[in-house]
Every structure is written in structure tokens, then in C-alpha cells.
Image (tube, rainbow, N blue to C red):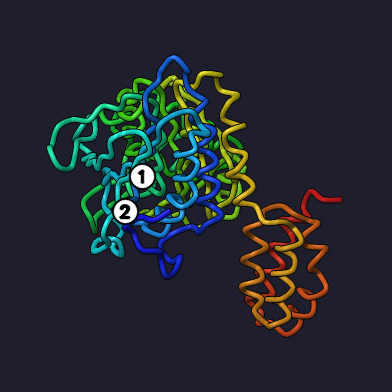
């Protein structure tokens, strides 16, 4: 297989070949997940087409499948500059090339003020002839989020002019009653909790579901909370929540998805990287989401043995901070702790007081409810 895009020289702008292979598997499965009566092309819309490494790996994995017609649908890859600011490092990046197998290629733009994407060359609105898989990446974090504080049953919003922001009462004209009601449960059992509400991304999802009349899947991968447990852990430990780039509240999105006639499934729960697949118009109903996300789960989760080996290696090299980062990214995993304990204990003896305290705090969290 040959095509014009050069192979990437590094993976700095992508998640690597294993993730691309999993997305290609998802695309192949998605071809059969929608109404078979709709014979149109499966459009894979990439809202981060400046991630050329990801696009290159995906094409290498997906194009042979598409030409073999394993999915029984034509497939087109559509680069689309969507709403929200591009990351600073992507401003000068060229976009990935559009390509297709069995359908005309197209490149799109989707500004925030438009209800539907437009062809980048003609400027005309573009309507898909079949189902759509949107690779949203970190769009949920790049679009506006509302930072809220729930304090003793009262909700306040971080708002105001730059440099003069403060906690203010929620404006009823800006937030629908269901929005404010939906967040009250987060603070139950906690005197105070701070959280983000991805309303910019929610408005994009509303438009995407309405536009993709033959069905849509939206795959997101960004720092955030994919479960209530993730959120509660941050709130209880007073983890820093940045007003500039808060974590994405994917759990809230999943709760509200039925309002769009959709459902959402968390593929991977983790404070550093939350992955969510939202689907509407699937032929087999909501249970299809779990089947579709199987390849993504395996691509994201390394084995405990691999993680334990990494922790032991880093600890033996004296880099306790990096070893702790691996431990914390693994969540509640006492078995991992036991597998790496000998190296951790030795490293902790000679570590700085701050790192020793960090290890102690992590141990307290992991062993709190473990016999």
C-alpha cells in the first residue's frame, strides 16, 4: 500500500500503532453496527487531523480492511477542522490527507457557529450518506467548560472577566434547570466539591446527533472523569482542578446521553486519560457499545506484570516519583502493589521526605478497604 503521507518519525503527536489498530478494529465492527437497510458509506471524521502520526497509523491499519470490504461498507476518512481552538503545537501542522475506499473523498470544516460541517473547498454544507464515526480526541477539553462549586447544597459558577473571575450565582437564563439539577448528586456526602461541566462539548454532540441522520458514534479520549468514583476521589483528596483546563466530566455526559437519544460507554477509567464511546442510531441497541469497545480496552490496558516490571525498574533506578506515577495511573490495584513492593520499600528508605509521604498517602488510599 502506498499513499502520499510520509510515515511519522516520532509518535509525539499521536497515541501510537496499538491505539490506531484498535480504532481500525472499531471502524470495522462499526460498519455492521448500524441499520443494514442504509447502504451508504461509513464516514470516519477525524476532528484532530493535525495528529498526522495517528492518521498515518490508522490509514495503514484500516485501508487494507476497507478495500477487502470486510465491513461490507465503503469507508472514507475525512479530516475535519472542528470547533474549538487548535493546540498551540498544532497551529503550523499540515493536516492529514483525505482518503476513501469506495466513495468520493472529502475534507470538511465545522466551525462552532455552524449546525453542520461544510466542504473545505466549496463551502457547501455536507451531509453524510451513511453512518458516521467521529474521532473527537480531546475536543471535549478544548471546548468551553463551566467550572462549578457545590457547597452545602448551593451551586456557584466560576465566571467573570479574565483577571477578575470569582464564584458567582448560577445564571438561570444560561443554564437550563435540568443542567443545574443534574449536578446536585455529585456533592452528596461531601461538604464541598468542585467539578467541570463540558457544556461546549454537549452542544457539539447535540448538533452531531441531529446531523448524522443514519447514526453516529463519537469516540473521545481526554483527561477527565469517566466514573463517579473518579470524581469523588479527586474531591475527597482535594486534587487540583484547574479553572483553565479542567478535567472532562465524561460521567456527566454518560448520564445525560439519553436526552440525545444516545448512550455512552466508558472504555477506560483513569484520571490521566478517560475514553468514552457515545452512540446513537445503532441497529442492535445500546448493548452494541460494549462489543464495539472491546479492541479499545485491550489497547489501553497493559498487563499487571508489565506495570509491575515498570514500577520495579523505576524504583530500582531511584526514580520513585516515576514509579509512583505508574502506580497511581493503575488505580486501586493491591496486587500490583504486592508485586512491586520489595523495590518500592528499598527506594522509599533513601527517598526524600516528600516522596516518602506521597508513597504513604497512596498506600493509605489503596489499602483503606483492602483486607
Q: Position of residue 45 (x, y in %)?
A: 35, 40
- Compared to residue 343, the image places residue 15 above or below, namely above
Q: Position of residue 56 (x, y in %)?
A: 41, 56
Mark 2: few, some, or many residues within 10 Å (few <14, many ≥20)? many
- Please state if 161 lies on the left or on the right of 202 as rendered: left
- Please state if 154 lies on the left or on the right of 45 as rendered: right
Label 1 secondary element:
strand
Residue at which label 1 appears: 46
Pointers 1 and 2 in contact (C-beta within 8 Å): yes
Of 225 and 356, the residue lying toward us: 225
Residue at position x 44%, y 59% from top?
14
Residue at position x 64%, y 47% from top?
298
Of 199 and 10, the residue lying toward us: 10
Q: Position of residue 15 (x, y in %)?
A: 49, 57
Of 265 and 35, the residue lying toward us: 35
Of 189 and 93, the residue lying toward us: 93
Residue at which label 2 appears: 96
Label 2 secondary element:
loop
Amino acid at each position: 500500500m502506498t499513499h502520499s503521507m510520509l510515515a511519522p518519525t516520532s509518535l509525539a503527536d499521536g497515541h501510537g500503532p496499538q491505539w490506531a489498530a484498535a480504532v481500525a478494529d472499531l471502524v470495522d465492527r462499526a460498519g455492521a453496527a448500524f441499520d443494514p437497510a442504509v447502504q451508504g458509506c461509513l464516514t470516519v471524521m477525524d476532528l484532530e487531523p493535525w495528529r498526522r502520526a495517528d492518521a498515518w497509523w490508522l490509514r495503514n491499519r484500516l485501508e487494507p480492511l476497507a478495500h477487502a470490504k470486510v465491513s461490507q461498507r465503503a469507508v472514507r476518512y475525512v479530516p475535519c477542522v472542528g470547533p474549538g481552538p487548535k493546540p498551540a503545537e498544532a497551529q503550523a501542522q499540515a493536516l492529514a490527507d483525505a482518503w476513501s475506499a469506495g466513495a468520493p473523498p472529502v475534507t470538511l470544516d465545522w466551525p462552532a457557529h455552524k449546525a453542520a460541517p461544510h466542504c473545505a473547498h466549496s463551502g457547501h454544507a455536507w451531509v453524510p450518506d451513511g453512518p458516521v464515526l467521529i474521532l473527537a480526541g480531546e475536543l471535549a477539553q478544548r471546548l468551553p467548560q463551566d467550572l462549578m462549586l457545590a457547597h452545602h447544597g448551593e451551586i456557584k459558577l466560576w465566571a467573570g472577566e479574565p483577571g477578575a473571575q470569582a464564584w458567582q450565582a448560577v445564571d438561570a437564563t444560561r443554564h437550563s434547570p435540568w443542567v443545574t439539577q443534574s449536578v446536585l448528586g455529585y456533592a452528596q456526602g461531601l461538604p464541598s466539591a468542585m467539578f467541570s461541566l463540558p457544556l461546549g462539548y454537549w452542544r457539539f454532540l447535540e448538533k452531531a446527533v441531529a446531523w448524522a441522520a443514519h447514526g453516529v458514534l463519537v469516540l473521545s479520549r481526554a483527561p477527565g472523569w469517566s466514573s463517579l468514583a473518579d470524581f469523588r476521589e479527586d474531591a475527597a483528596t482535594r486534587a487540583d482542578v484547574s479553572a483553565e483546563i479542567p478535567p472532562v466530566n465524561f460521567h456527566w455526559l454518560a448520564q445525560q446521553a439519553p436526552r440525545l437519544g444516545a448512550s455512552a460507554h466508558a472504555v477506560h477509567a483513569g484520571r490521566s486519560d478517560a475514553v468514552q464511546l457515545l452512540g446513537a442510531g445503532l441497529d442492535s441497541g445500546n448493548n452494541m457499545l460494549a462489543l464495539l469497545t472491546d479492541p479499545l480496552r485491550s489497547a489501553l490496558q497493559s498487563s499487571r506484570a508489565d506495570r509491575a516490571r515498570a514500577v520495579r525498574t523505576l524504583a530500582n533506578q531511584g526514580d520513585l516519583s516515576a514509579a509512583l506515577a505508574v502506580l497511581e495511573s493503575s488505580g486501586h490495584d493491591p496486587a500490583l502493589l504486592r508485586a512491586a513492593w520489595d523495590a518500592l520499600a528499598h527506594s522509599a528508605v533513601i527517598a526524600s521526605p516528600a516522596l516518602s509521604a506521597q508513597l504513604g498517602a497512596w498506600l493509605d488510599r489503596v489499602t483503606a478497604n483492602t483486607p
